[in-house]
Amino acid sequence: MTTTKPTVSFEFFPTQTQQGKEKLLATFDSLNTLSPIYFSVTYGAGGSTRERTLDIVDSLCARSDTPIAPHISCIGDSKAQIAELLERYKAQGINRLVALRGDLPSGQVGMGELPFALDLVKFIREHTGDYFHIEVAAYPEMHPQARSFEFDIENLVKKFNAGANTAITQFFYNADSYLYLRDALEKNGIDTTDKPLVAGIMPIVNASNLIRFADSCGADIPRYIRKQLADFGDDRKAIREFGFDIVYRLCERLINEGVPALHFYSMNKVQPNMRLVEALGL
Ligand code: FAD
């Protein structure tokens, strides 16, 4: 069987310090040598990282011609704030966005004028027509607050029908959950060759951070992975090698199943991402 190679993109989060920013720019330069189709930069819901996200986006745009896709979240923000961001990005020549609801930082209340990502996708299309390529979020293992799997699928279908071009999944380590979601989209009338389901890939480098993050966002870490990570304790080298093997196998399976694109949650690191992309021959 011949398979087409998936495209690759990387996600960054905005850093807190100038030193962190310099490291991030060096990471960008290294990962950029892998010819990704874009880099995305996360955005703290309720505007909590607004200035830092904009600063990183500006710096990356100035650094190379590789497209930058800012994340934009709607929960807790006003329509006016979002319209202002859209205009800013448009004026900068940015034409790709990752559109999300976001999760409010604890203590912050009020959903804002656009409570769900679907409202945001509609708002972007109303205000800027077809200008932006819009990516939305998808959940192979269900969003933790979803009423049911069916409800979550309907929500994703609505986001596509409202104008999303592509969906990026939450990270997962069970390839079947991705394939099941892709089939469910097809059954619900979404042609995934036209509206691709991009696999979100989380390299494994730090066991405790990974487990904490997975628990908070409802991503499953299969028992055979969780147990082995626990057994390795503080042996970072063993975790790194095991993590590489697990994620390499996951990507290999997805590639054999025709995944159109891999989006790496880079954690602002070079090595684990570069090693995977190079080993996979992407
Ligand atoms: P939605 O699609 O709006 O769905 C959220 C939940 O609401 C789901 O359970 C859905 O089933 C439910 N729902 C939808 N409509 C309704 C309705 N009318 N009534 C009741 N329930 C409803 N977070 C950030 O803060 N910043 C980021 O930069 C960021 N980047 C991300 C990138 C990716 C690729 C992914 C997968 C997630 C990212 N997140 C980010 C996390 C994301 O914001 C959270 O998972 C958030 O809880 C949901 O966002 P969403 O866009 O999927 O929301």
Image: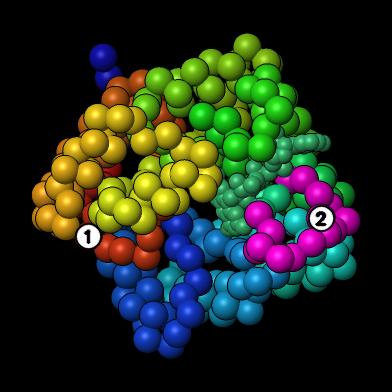
The residue sitting at 42% across, 34% down in the picture is 220
Question: In the depicted view, which residue is nearer to us: 191 or 121?
Answer: 121
Q: Left of 130 or right of it: where is 106?
A: left
Question: Does residue 46 lie above or below 195 as drawn?
Answer: below
Residue 94 magenta: no
Q: In this view, does 93 lie to the left or right of 12?
A: right
Residue 124 at what x, y percent from top left?
Answer: 79, 52
Say whether mark 1 is within 8 Å of ligand 1.
no
Q: What stretch is highlighted in magenta?
A: 103-117
Name the quadrant where ligand 1 sits.
Answer: top right
Q: Quadrant of the C terminus?
A: top left
User: Which of the labelled discs sits on residue 111, or is there none?
Assistant: 2
Is residue 114 shown in magenta? yes
Report, in whole angstroms, how far the alpha carbon at label 1 lies from the one at label 2. Answer: 38 Å
Of residues 134 and 42, the one drawn nearer to the viewer in this rendering: 42
Q: Which of marks 1 and 2 is nearer the N terminus?
A: 2
Marks 1/2 in contact by CB < 8 Å: the verdict is no
Tell me if mark 1 has few (under 14), some (14-19) or many (20+) residues whose alpha carbon lies within 10 angstroms of its own: some
* Other-residue count near label 2 (Cα within 10 Å), few / some / many at <14 / 14–19 / ≥20: some
Return the residue at label 1.
Answer: 271
Q: Hey, which quadrant is residue 58 in on the image?
A: bottom right
